[in-house]
Image: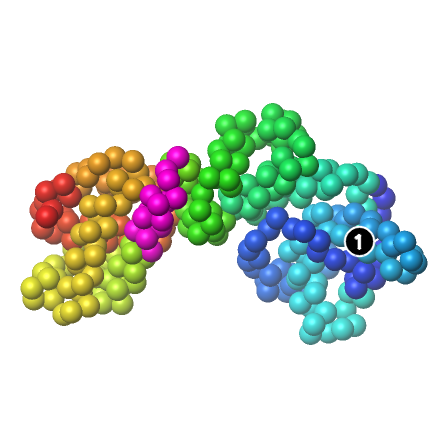
Amino acid sequence: MGHTRVVPFDRIVEGNNIRQTYLGIEELAASIAELGVIHDLTVRWRRSSESPDKDRFEIADGHRRYRAIKMIRERNQGAFKDVKIDILDGTDTDAVLVMLDASLKTKSLSPGEIAIGLQRLVNLRLDQASIARRLSLTPGYVSSLLRCRNGLIEPLFARLTDRRLPVDTAVRLVGQSAEDQEAALKLMEEAEVVTAVLETSGQNGVTGEHVDPEPETAPPDLAAAAKRARKVARAVTSAVVGTVRPSVKELKAELVKWGDKDKPFAAGVRAALGFALGKKKAIRETP
């Protein structure tokens, strides 16, 4: 770290951040308004060739705090006119390392966001072994996230970024063709549709308890949901898990692993299992 100084807030800029999602900014703004900024923003000094008055300070660590202060100032221009900063003396690589290290300690980045940062370090000529050592990560974890960054189609990587796709499932998908990844994505989206239909229609799509709406007797929306659910339950594992038409018992075992990692997807497939279990058939036996 370099040195500390106080600068006008308007001279601080976000720069090229790896964070894609900003949660809890309203709550953080309320905390800062009451208690002040407890941890200073870490920045890089971007000097202007024209005039010192045009110098800017680019954030390396503290993007959420910056946005919270900005929110406060939008409501009260007199607040936080000046803020205290820690100036980082270092390279672009150092700035990314600081950004990643701070966020990894607070667990505030998603796996996809971490992957974006790791790829940026690779682009800056830092090898994977050095990245793992300097960020206290395992080489395997670094390698897996980089494979996801470069091997997933963008919609699937977006799910990794917003925590809707667990890392282990993402890694399995990396080895599949773009066409197979598109098929897996479609199944995930289908599972979410099924979940929404079941929840709005009184079905327990979270626990998997079955209230039997037979396709022949159920209202049209539930009949369609039943058919889609059974289709998802049959096909989802061959595209995502990597096994072929497993039994209900086997798929339930997979859901135990997914439940806390990918709740929307797990809930959708769990709802599909509700229908399969209600018919007392293994998925491989469902026509």
Residue at 49% x, 35% y is 147
Report the magenta residues as a range.
Answer: 175-189
Which is nearer the eye, 166 or 187? 187
Q: Is residue 76 above or below residue 242?
A: below
Tell me if residue 88 can be seen: yes
Residue at 30% x, 51% y is 187
Residue at 35% x, 45% y is 179
**Element at badge 1?**
strand
Look at label 1 and name its amino acid. Phe
Residue 103 on image: x %, y %: 61, 44
Q: Residue furthest right?
A: 51
Q: Is residue 20 magenta?
A: no
Q: Residue furthest left?
A: 216
Name the chief secondary structure element in magenta. Answer: helix
Residue 48 on image: x %, y %: 87, 54
Horizontal arrangement in the rendering, residue 143 relative to residue 89 (left or right) = left
Task: Give the residue pinned by disc 1.
Answer: 57
Q: Quadrant of the N terminus?
A: top right
Q: Is residue 124 above or below residue 213?
A: above
Place residue 224 in its image quadrant. bottom left
